[in-house]
Amino acid sequence: MPPRLRVYRKLLSAFIFVAIYIVSRTPYNAKLGHSTTNTSSRTSFSHNKVYSTIQHRAESSLESVRVSFKLHNIDDVPVPDKFLSVDTFVCQKRSDLPPSFAPTQDGRLFDFTTTVSTDLKLIFMGDSLGHQFSQGFDAAVLEEGHESRRNVMLKYQIKRKIFDCLTISAPTRGGGVSAFWRFTKLLQRGKGRKSMACSAIETGWGQNFALRLLDYQYSDDSAPNSANIVSGFDAAILRIPHGWMKAEEITRERLVEAIHFCNEVLGVRTVVITTIAINNNAIKTGEWDEVTKTNVMIQNIQDNWKQPNDGEDGVEWVLLQQFSSFTLELIKANAEYIGYDVSNTDYLFDQLAGNLNWPQAIPMVCANKPRDNLVTECHRNKISPDGIHWCVETIGPRYTASVACLLGCIYNGRTPERTTDGLASLRRCEHDCNEQFMTLKRVDEEWIGNGRTIFSESKPVV
């Protein structure tokens, strides 16, 4: 194992509440925090109520913003599919989403795209689901014309399907780094090898993967002749590889070790865990019950996370991206539209019949209720291409916005204090980010297509 990284960061005192700011018509710059306007609109979330005021602020008021995002009309910024490398991930030529998902006077669910600006060094870790959403994030964080900054270091191919094992994009919009490390088992200290090949199923993890990421060099936009070395990462977005791992294998001890691993090998201080969603590996009631228990365990790990002492290395913050509950809402809404009784959860486990490589739940993959459940009668939808993966063109913009929003709770403004009040402010910020982007809550029209910069921050009530 490479020498343990010690990426110390000066932690600042925190505010006590959350605000999501919308900075009116603020274009992105090479570095975050340099606005060309001093007028902004501020929107705060409080107990699911939204209120807005207009403020006049100095340009310096953005200097503490390290991660922000913008929402766009699809005609202006395309859906984030340009890096999708597996043909069966692509969902563009599918049946339309249910009419209830269309824009209304209350806002939009999916008819927008997202771009991100950040100086953070981020790494997505996991299996092909983490893979596809990291590709969507890269499309959002790399400016048009800078696609060559995305470097696929290791990959493998099965027929026409190209799977990334290791990628890195740098510098991103804002000067940061976005990387992906594929694994199909949660990484363990004792499973490290000096060198591992990129393959569909690994038996351990390779130090060569970590070192290639950490030693990666790139030039900064403001100093094109300079050489920056990644050295370590600020945050990891962790997709637990359920399916490759059975629910009973995903123990508290195994997951806690994986969280610590992110720091020990990559220097990470913040870990965002994506809760496990229903898919072909939880297609029976009993299987889904076990996944539900695993998600409860993940929540419990977060609730009881012990931060390192001042001056010590370690993962300081654990956040949850509530992807499981979001996708359940999505599937339920589609199930109701195509004619299922949604008063109970039986619809989740109604499967297609026919020549399939794995089970596929009808409300997850079909835009209709097929005759006799026949796969040949299923009109494929824009939610999931195959009952495992998700349509990044549809869900990717909300996923990406939620990641940027969650990270802002830590890295924008002043870092949350390690006190009861500080943690409460962080949890409220986390809740509001999930409430806005990991539910079927509509996004207000004024947030979309007008150049506004959006960012989250743990902040007190005045």
Image: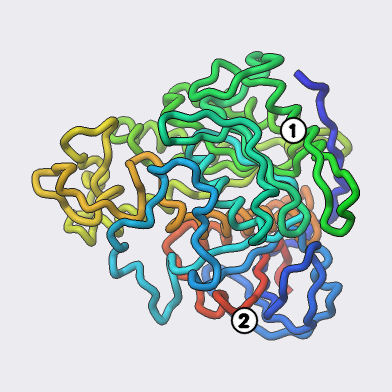
- Residue type (three-letter) at the residue carrying disc 1: Leu
| Quarter where residue 252 is shown | top right
Label 2 crowding class (10 Å Cα cut-off): few <14, some 14-19, many 20+? few
Q: Is residue 413 visible?
A: yes
Q: Secondary structure at mark 1?
A: helix
Q: Is residue 284 visible?
A: no
As drawn, the label of residue 217 is none
Picture residue at 74% right of the left edge, 33% below the top? 266
As drawn, the label of residue 52 is 2
Between residue 158 and residue 433, name the one nearer to us. 158
Percent across and percent down for residue 436 are 52, 64
Percent across and percent down for residue 83 are 54, 48
Percent across and percent down for residue 41 are 67, 81
Give the quadrant of the C terminus. Answer: bottom right
Between residue 16 and residue 234, name the one nearer to us. 234
Is residue 458 rendered to the left or right of residue 354?
right
Mark earlier in primary sequence (2, 1): 2
Picture residue at 59% right of the left edge, 54% below the top? 139
Q: Is residue 446 above or below residue 194?
A: below
Is residue 295 rendered to the left or right of residue 366?
right
Picture residue at 68% right of the left edge, 41% below the top? 168
Q: Nearer the viewer, mark 2 or mark 1?
A: 1
Residue at the spot of label 1: 266
- Residue type (three-letter) at the residue carrying disc 2: Ser
Label 1 crowding class (10 Å Cα cut-off): few <14, some 14-19, many 20+? many
Is residue 301 rendered to the left or right of residue 333?
right
Between residue 311 and residue 444, name the one nearer to us. 444
